[in-house]
Amino acid sequence: MSDITTFRSATEETPLARRVLIGIAAGGLGLLVFAPLIVVFAAALQQGLAAAIASLGNQDALSAIKLTLIITAISLPLNAAFGIASAWFITKFDFRGKAFLITLIDLPFSVSPVVAGLCIILMFGTNSLVGGWLVASGYPIVFALPGIVLATMFVTFPFVARELIPVMIEQGRTEEEAALTLGASGWRVFLTVTLPNIRWALLYGVLLCNARAMGEFGAVAVVSGKIRGQTATMPITIEMLYNEYLSVAAFSMAAVLALLALVTLLLKTALELRLADQLSASNRH
Amino acid sequence: MRIEIDEIAKSFGTTAALHPVSFAIPSGALVALLGPSGSGKTTLLRILGGLEFPESGRVMFDGVDATGLSVQDRRAGFVFQSYALFRHMTVFENIGYGLNARPRAARPPKAEITRRVTKLLDLIQLPEIGARYPSQLSGGQRQRVALARALAIEPRMLLLDEPFGALDAKVRRELRQGLRDIHDETGLTTVFVTHDQEEAMELADLVVVMSMGRIEQIGKPQDIRARPATDFVREFITV
């Protein structure tokens, strides 16, 4: 026994406990996140880079990539707008049924995407009242772009609102009230006070929304009809290629989708770093 | 500007925040709305500022009915309890906000805005802090910036909600004098809300003691001290 005893601080674990915890975290991350990512890229490149790129060059593959990007480009700004509007409505006004509305916003998280897809078919399919009329007028929803966009928007609806609501609750209404007393119009208050205060939460929500919109499978699988070269998005195409034993093509497409997700993640990280810089800059002195 | 409050009443849901209250504030006065929390004093201040609207009664500014006037058109310089400075703007941008928010035709040119903001920074005796952000200021500095921001719009009256509530005793004393000086210099009709009877008695020309949405007494500080009208007033001012 040595005379000098070093005390652990109250929140510090024993060295063994620390190692076990770090081991579990690292092992879990490696097994569940990194390994699959590496496997996808390895499988895509099993016959060389040329084969992988060639498999992405055909009409159907290009059409799938294009379709996914179009759907994301449509649903993202719309859901950002809906998200801001609902977060604004919920946090800035007091009304009856507020808790119910918040639950309703979360509904897409708890409802299976397949069920959501079926709901859209029931509402807008050729056998429905609205759908029949729309098809007759030449604007089909189901098995066409609008249906896929609707399905994607339904599934990704909560992301922006969910990010914004806690931030807006925490910030309260007084800054907006102050701007109003200074003579600013409602729209000006929104642009100069509300939006700058929520911009990071909004970007974060939009990025999460983006990742999910590109990757959505279940709801889109139901409403798209999986028409190759027309309504098959990237995830749908991956599944079809895989079922046809075209593994290089399937994994190449999967690798592209994973890359798009990684780009989103990098963007998010870059934004967070910039935010941290800004925060430390304004807290100095 | 003379303010008349005529039978103003307001309730939130089933609880009455203000029973019909009436009184007049002479032009250029410095008035304290004094009372415990829940007495309706902040509600009354927010009604004057156009942030809440009464269920009945009228508000008159210089004899003109202003009850339905929008918050933007009231031109009331409002200082919030937590100051509500715009955290993503510098002190300079905060103070200039009201001038920049004016419609294009009424907006002063950039150089004029700079000149006025600089002058206001001098008035609050913080000429060096224009480039800082609110998070870099002390509580007392924030309060003074909020006051300058409210003064920048050339308000017709100054309304302050617990302006010294979040400050320590020493700063409180300094800023009390600061508010008195600014009031005397601008001559603006000023109404402030407080639950601190000492603050009200020391600073105000006229004290309105409120409780449970009713006015208990209106008078000069020395008169209220000498002749409390009700038991509530007597107890409240001797705490």
Image (cartoon, coloured by chain):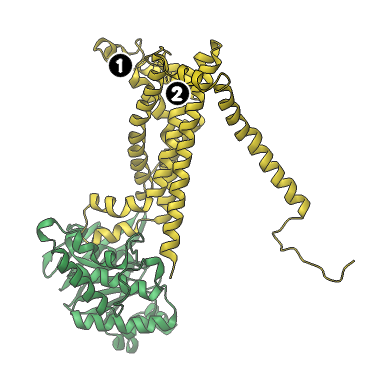
**Residue B167's mark?**
none
Position of A246 relative to A194 (above/below): above
- Residue B71's spot in the image, x, y percent? 21, 59
> Is mark 2 in CB contact (under 8 Å) with mark 1?
no
Q: Is A1 placed left or right of A21 in the picture?
A: right
Residue A105 visible in image: no
Q: Earlier in the sequence, mark 2 or mark 1?
A: 2
Colour of the chain lettered A: yellow
Position of A82 relative to A125 (above/below): below
* Mark nearer the viewer, 2 or 1: 2
Q: Amino acid at mark 1?
A: Val
Position of A236 relative to B205 (above/below): above
**Disc 2: which residue:** A116
**Residue A130's mark?**
1
- Residue B211's spot in the image, x, y percent? 36, 71
Q: Is B5 placed left or right of A66 in the picture?
A: left
Residue at 45% over, 47% down: A270
Q: Amino acid at mark 2?
A: Ala
Colour of the chain lettered B: green
Residue B155 vs residue B99, the one in the foreground? B99
